[in-house]
Image: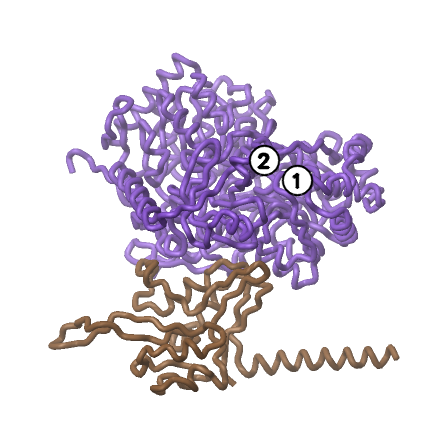
Amino acid sequence: MNRFIAVTQSKCIGCRTCEVACVLAHACDPSVEGLSRLTFMPRLTMIKTKEVSAAVTCHHCDDAPCANVCPNGAISYRHNSVQVDQDRCIGCKTCMLACPFGAMNVITVPATRAFAGVQMTVGVKARAHKCDLCVGHDGGPACVSVCPTKALQAVDRADMDLTLRQRQERAAYELAGKAAAL
Amino acid sequence: MEKHMTVCPYCGSGCKLNLLVENNKVVGAEPLNGVTNEGELCLKGYYGWDFINDTKILTPRLRHPMIRRKKGAEFEVVSWDEAIKFTASRLAEIKAKHGPDSIMLTGSSRGTGNESNFVMQKLARAVIGTNNVDCCARVCHGPSVSGLMVTLGNGAMSNSMVEIEDSKCILVFGYNAADSHPIVARRIVKAKEKGAQIIVCDPRRIETARIADLWLQLNNGSNMALVNAFANVLINEGLYNKDYVANFSEGFEEYKATVSKYTPEYVESITGLSAEMIREAMRMYAAAPSATILWGMGVTQWGQAVDVVKGLSSLAVLTGNLGRPNVGVGPVRGQNNVQGACDMGALPNVLPGYQSVIDAEARAKFAKAWGVPSLPDKIGMSITDVPHMAEEGKLKAFYCFGEDPAQTEPDLNLVRKAFEKLDLMIVQDIFMTKTAMFADVVLPATSWGEHDGVFSSADRGFQRFTKAVDAKGDVKHDWEIFGLMATALGYPMQYKDTKEIWDELRELCPLYYGATYEKMDGLGYVQWPCTTVESPGTQYLYEGNVFQRDGGKALLFASEWRPPLDKLDAEFPLVLCTVREVGHYSCRSMTGNCTALQTLADEPGYVTINPENAKALGIKDQQLVWVSSRRGKVIARANVTDRTNVGAVYMTYQWWIGACNELTIHHVDPISKTPEYKYSAVKVEAIADQLGAENFVQQEYAKLKGSLSKEGTRTPAYA
């Protein structure tokens, strides 16, 4: 089973600390000084409706529509998650259309190339932009570690098994209770 | 990398954190396991520190003292010697000519700390000789202090933030914890998980309303009617604690008579709530084994605010929800040290430690300690008196310390006129602010992160914070500046550090005597009253149901409901209510200079409006609109959301272009003198030329930023 970020919307207070943490965790320059409105593109988005406040992000589906439709094989399963190989991304946006959660975005960044020891900008490079579970960052997903109300949790197979077990036990107790009442 | 322990400079939650420092520059923040924050921080705590580094995103840090030699002259950078001499001679002249009460000083509820506030009021009382000192508590929780002082005998939160999560019922009244105190909101979320019932009284669908068991969407301006109806239900349905009322309270008969008319049916038309819902709320509140009331600006920023505070405290008394853990009354203080500024006597009626200025014995004690023959015995002016007192010529000099009234007071046009009338205006701040533009003297101070001290969190908790980096420029600690000013005025005053000031304070204030620097070391948290060196402090007040009033009983008190002052009509058909947003704080001089926070939200700011109102006005989400009242007109961006109730619009008060205080009314509570920020009649108009409007916003913003930047970055003539 792929790992993913579980969102408990009843705990979310809509503060957007997760969004900033996400951007900083993926920035070349991890200091806040590099932030700007134009380049602020978190991989999870705070959504507020009348009834819900929640950060919406990638589910790391086990049969991921984005991976299934990618014509260039840029999206694959690695580290128990759905990851994008940016070198292969052509910016066709099929993954964006396929994702039912709106968790996939396609963005462009300046493309650079080294020539004679000099970095040059050569047009733009497309990127399928989504949650990568902060693979390679110390301390796990940044959004999870900063959430002040613990509304975000990184969940893996073992966590899920524990939750299932608790629910099964509760269901069994409820059955027993009903039996006793008969 | 160095780590320096401090306390967050934003809301009153009192979160402990480390500032991370490299090469004398702050580069990050990490949470500490403080008593209130338990290893968590919110958006501002994590990302609200780079203003220290003088990012100049909004406005520059002040680096040099500046004076205007004459009214209307250009600012001139001068030495500290000259700035202090100039200011002191002007103050002395005004005092000699018009008396000490023609001078007013403010405390600062922000990053400066308790010690500076103590020294400021000492300068006012012992040196200048006036009780004209006040702080921004006036415009926020002043009514809570005034109201609770009368009904319970102590103006602070009765219980502690850590107890909230173990309360079985939380009544949230006019308080949006998610935006004002995320770390308190976290306690409410935890309480809910532990099985607490949550009742929310708020016209907006705030975050807490989403998880509430009952959401009472009352009409704007109906607080007193609803609180009276709550009391009416508790009494008429026999839900109140008769023994508790008989043993520990007084005034029941009169109270009962006042609320008798406020049946749930009677208030239906005022509040817009069904009688059944009001009854259900009180059945839930009264049945809970422990219940806490939390309130914020939705209760206090009204022309009728003190009365509502008294009414809320009476609900706690009626149900016996005081004097034990996990219950009580919680006016959750907004600014990180507004509790502290009050604790230090930055109020016109009390000396430090809430010792009354009309108490001759208290005055004599302070006068003796400070080596002056006497201290002023007349209650001073409040900060909301400044406009009309200046207008009437009774106020000649205003010494504004760490506040920005030209942004935060109601009816800004009135404020600006008042400032222009003054003979002398002194601004002591870390940033060039809109207020500083009016100043004759600008005194640059060290910022949070550049000095040591003690803050008081919202639940009376003293905590130490420490310096992380050296200040840049020719700046001084606030308490040093006040010391120099006092000395120049003929009263030598010199402290070597904040501990020396704190120890002087402890000796004078029995409430704080046991709160030593040593006890507050590291993550130490000392809640006053702490009267002995052995005492750990007091987590909840009124133990044994002994109240701090003469006779020891709580007072039950109700008042008739009064409608808000401003009137809606065909021209101005909508209510404007000013509110907070999580990413910005106070006048925004700090958060507006933080890269992350400014990235999330920038000018002109939002006006939130219900889809029904927006549709009728032809306004789409994110469009620029005009918002105007009988007092002014500003441009703002529409945020069309059904979290906002029909008939009202909401704006946050920190924007320069979308400055909602150009629109608000100067109408104050008769007792606390707190303005009615929550109710002004406005109209909202669509703008056809959106591109032109966007350009207008950018131009105006650039113009304002440019003018403040020009003044704030002046350099000495010799440089």
Q: Position of residue B261 (x, y in %)?
A: 79, 34
Residue position marked by numbered label 1 in the rendering: B223
Marks 1 and 2 belong to one chain: yes
Residue visible at 67% across and 47% down in the picture:
B293
Q: Position of residue A107 (x, y in %)?
A: 34, 71
Residue visible at 49% across and 58% down in the picture:
A15
Residue type at mark 2: give it. Trp
**Chain A appears what colour?**
brown
Q: Position of residue B651 (x, y in %)?
A: 48, 45
- First-in-chain label (1 vs 2): 1
Callout 1 crowding tier (Cα within 10 Å): few <14, some 14–19, many ≥20: many
Q: Which disc is residue B202 wearing?
A: none
Residue position marked by numbered label 2 in the rendering: B302
Q: Position of residue B539 (x, y in %)?
A: 64, 48
Residue B420 sits in quarter: top left
Disc 1 + disc 2, Cβ < 8 Å: yes
Q: Quadrant where the C terminus of chain A lies?
A: bottom right
Mark 1 residue element = helix
Measure the alpha-carbon separation of dots 1 and 2.
Answer: 9 Å
User: Can the viewer see residue B326 in this picture?
Assistant: yes
Q: Chain of mark 1?
A: B
Callout 2 crowding tier (Cα within 10 Å): few <14, some 14–19, many ≥20: many
Q: Nearer the viewer, residue A157 or A110?
A: A110
Q: Chain of mark 2?
A: B
Chain letter of the purple region = B
* For residue B626, above or below residue A117: above
Residue visible at 39% across and 35% down in the picture:
B479
Q: Is residue B532 left or right of residue B661?
A: right
Residue type at mark 1: give it. Asn
Mark 2 residue element = loop
